[in-house]
Image: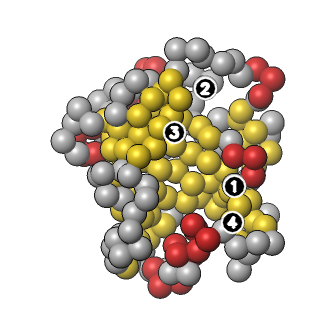
Amino acid sequence: MGTLQCPRTAVLLIPALLLCAGMRDWALDFQPCDGQMQSPINIDPKTTTFSPELQPIMLSGYDLPPSESLKLKKNGHTIMLSLPENLTMTGGYAQEYRAAQLHLHWGSRGEPGSEHTVNGHRFAGEIHVVYYNSRFDNIKEAMSEPGGLAVLAAFLEAGPEENVPYQHILEHLEEVQEEGKALS
C-alpha cells in the first residue's frame, strides 16, 4: 500500500449543508444551491481572491493522547472516523466549530480520487474533517441550519514515504471493509 502525503497543502473551508440526497437534488430544496459554485468544485487559483475579513483558521485539541479511543467505521461509501467534540476550529467566519468526524475520498487506477479539483487536476484522495457550529448541541441539530456545518478539506497524494499521522488509520482499513462494520 502506498503512503499518503499532503501536497503543497491546499486547504478548503467549505460551509456545508448535508441534507440532500445528492448534488443534483440540492436546488430542489435549497434555491441558493442552484448555482455554478457548488461542491464539488474546480478551484482555479488565477480567479481566487483573498478575503481580508476571514480570520486565520485555528485548530485546537488535536494533541490527543495515544490512548484516546476513536471509532473507525465504513458507512457504505467511505471510511469515517468519529472525533471527540473537544477538537475545535475557530477563525475563518469568526465562529467556533466542534469536530464530529473525518472521512476520506480516494480513488484507484483510472477512478476519481478527490472530490474537488485544482485547475481540473484530481488528487489521489481528499480528507474532510466535518465540524458543527458550537451554538448547537450536536451535529444532528446543526445539519439543517445555515452555518451549522463546516468542512475542512485537504488533498492527498500517494508518495514514497510513510506519513505517520495517517498510519494508524491506514493499518486498520482492512478490518472495516464491510458496510456498517466499526472498530474502536
**Residue 63 vs residue 94, the one in the foreground:** 63
- Kind of residue at badge 4: Leu
Ranked by sequence position, the earlier of labels 1 and 2 is: 1
Q: What's the CA distance linking mark 1 and mark 4? A: 7 Å
Q: Quadrant of residue 63?
A: bottom left
Q: Residue at x 76, y 72 (%)?
A: 161
Location of residue 177 in the rendering, given as x and y in whole percent from the top left corner: 49, 80
Question: Can you give x and y, in whole percent of width and height, for residue 65 in the image?
Answer: 38, 68
The residue positioned 66% from the left and 18% from the top of the image is 50
Q: Secondary structure at mark 2?
A: loop
Q: Which residue is mark 1?
A: 6
Q: Nearer the viewer, residue 142 or 93?
A: 93
Q: Which label is found at residue 37? A: 2
Give the residue displayed 55% in from the left and 60% down from the top. Answer: 104
Q: CA distance from mark 4 to mark 3?
A: 28 Å
Residue bearing the label numbered 3: 23
For this view, does 96 lie left or right of residue 38? left
* Secondary structure category for the residue under label 3: helix
Q: Are marks 4 and 2 in contact (CB under 8 Å)?
A: no
Q: Secondary structure at mark 1?
A: loop
Mark identifier at residue 4: 4
| Residue type at tag 2 | Met
**Cα distance in 3D space between marks 1 and 2:** 24 Å
Q: Earlier in the sequence, mark 4 or mark 3?
A: 4
Q: Nearer the viewer, mark 1 or mark 2?
A: 1
Identify which residue, 71 or 77, lies in the foreground. 71
Neighbor class of circle 4 (other Cα within 10 Å; few <14, some 14-19, many 20+) is many
Real-space Cα separation, disc 2 to disc 3, in angstroms: 11 Å
